[in-house]
Image: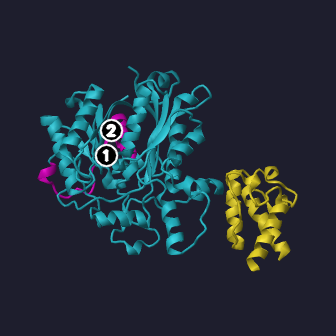
Chain colours: A yellow, B cyan
Amino acid sequence: MTDEVARKVIEIIAEQAVLEPDQVTLDSTLEDLGVDSLGLVEAVFAIEEAFDISIPFNANDPASSEFDISNVRAMVEAVKSLIAAKGA
Amino acid sequence: MRRVVITGAGTINALGRSVPETMAAMAEGRCGIGPLEFRDVERLSIRIGGQIRDYDENAHFNRQEIALYDRFTQYALLSAREAVAQSGLVIDDALAPRAGVIIGTSGGGLHTQDENYRLVYEEGKNRVHPLIVPRLMNNAAASHISMTYGAKGPSYCVATACSSSNHAIGQAFHLIRSGATEVMLAGGSEAMLVFGGIKAWEGLRVMSKDGCRPFSRTRNGMVQGEGAAVFVLEERERAIARGAPILAEIVGFAMTSDASDIVMPSQDGAARAITGALADAGMAPEEVGYINAHGTGTTANDRTECAAVRQVFGRHADRLMISSTKSMHGHLIGGTGAVELLAVIMALRDGIVAPTIGFEEPDPDCDLDVVPNVARRTEVRAALSNAFAFGGLNAVLALRAA
């Protein structure tokens, strides 16, 4: 489950970055990967669809949203907590 | 007075994926109307249209572009690509602020609306794709063309139903003639062949179930089409200086409003628009050799349009040619005047007048030379293109051979 979440999130981000999943690491930042604001909202949508969760993300000011997008690891962790919260 | 010429043309419609293909089809009198193919078509009573067959968006655009481009934007961009290539236009830093884009469309991103209404209403989904708004907005096509070619001057869209394209091209002409801009990309696009788009028109009961036969006594309504055409309009001296191909010259434009009825056409409004375009062009009625008709194939339009032409041209009405190419490509609504301008260019440049196909029987109410069924080869020096929209908004362009 744990690895599966990371694998899926990476796959979604890689698609927006037009990269192969193995080019995206947990330490990559969206800036490193060249994912722009439109790519980010599309990735958030795809992650929500994939895990059937609602991500607290505000495109007006992505950096200060509750959803931590500082790097891929932070995003994966946030997605895992949202999945856990949903199951609780 | 600054003069305005057309230096490039591009299109995609039911008759072809390019201007040469489309003009060849028009010259042959080929019909692009056939059975509609899309989801839920079996729930429609109207099942024919001028649809672009076997269209594959992935052949033209990448995944990220497709996320942003509704079908009507795709058609507009493909048309702009062909037009700019033919024109050889390069919008550099100096030209950018003096270059703009005006694209007519009636429905805008109807594929996007149709698909997403289905998702939220029919399938009960609560999460929608984040880019629906920039995809469906009516100005998306104009914006993406401006972004693609770096046009940083005035750009906007025009939505005047069936006159949208003529209003767009006419206003682009005005901007260049007045000195506000040097070059414009102008035209129209429509992608209404989706379930909701046709279902709404079905309700009006002006659509034909079996074919578009403008001016024929046997006509029984309009048939929709889809697609786009975009033109490069350019100040004449500039075009000549850079050795650009000159397809035709736009010499006049007029707009009128019927101010009477939301759907019924008015002879007076149409006649005033035609008269206004001639006056703006400094063109005597006797000079006009060809009129590309609005010619929808409805009882009311064709009768009213012919009466307006007779009113303006008097005896010369019996000497000029008037044809409706909607019989071949269908009615592209907001994109229609742009595709029809190709027939005007073909007449002025190549001396080939596109026919009104599907003509079966003369109608005393449409007693003009409608170039029935077979194209005609003859020299045409001056021509008009009519557009008379629902809402009583009329726009007529006047052109001369280059």
Q: Mark 2 falls on what kind of element?
A: helix
User: Which comes sooner in the sequence, label 2 or label 1?
Assistant: 2
**Is B341 included in the stretch rendered in magenta?**
yes
Q: Say what amino acid the circle numbered 2 marks.
A: Ala
Write the residue at 29% across / 28% down. Answer: B280
Magenta stretch in the rendered image? B338-366
| Residue A28 in the image, given as x and y percentages of width and height | 85, 56
Q: Secondary structure at mark 1?
A: loop
Question: Where is B321 relative to B31, above or below?
Answer: above
Residue type, numbered disc 1: Ala
Report the Cα–Cα distance between label 2 and label 1.
7 Å
Q: Residue at 38%, 36% (x, y): give it.
A: B170
Residue wearing tag 2: B347
Q: Could you say which quadrant of the image residue B133 lies in?
A: bottom right
For the residues bearing labels 2 and 1, Cβ distance under 8 angstroms? yes
Instruction: Count neighbours of disc 1 (C-alpha within 10 A) and say few if under 14, some if 14 to 19, many if 20 or more.
Output: many
Residue under the image location 58 percent in, 31 percent down:
B91
What residue sits right under mark 1 in the picture? B354
Of B363 and B260, nearer the camera is B260
Which chain is disc 1 placed on?
B
Q: Few, some or many C-alpha atoms within 10 Å of disc 2 (few <14, some 14-19, many ≥20)?
A: many
- Relative image position of residue B345 (x, y in whole percent): 37, 38
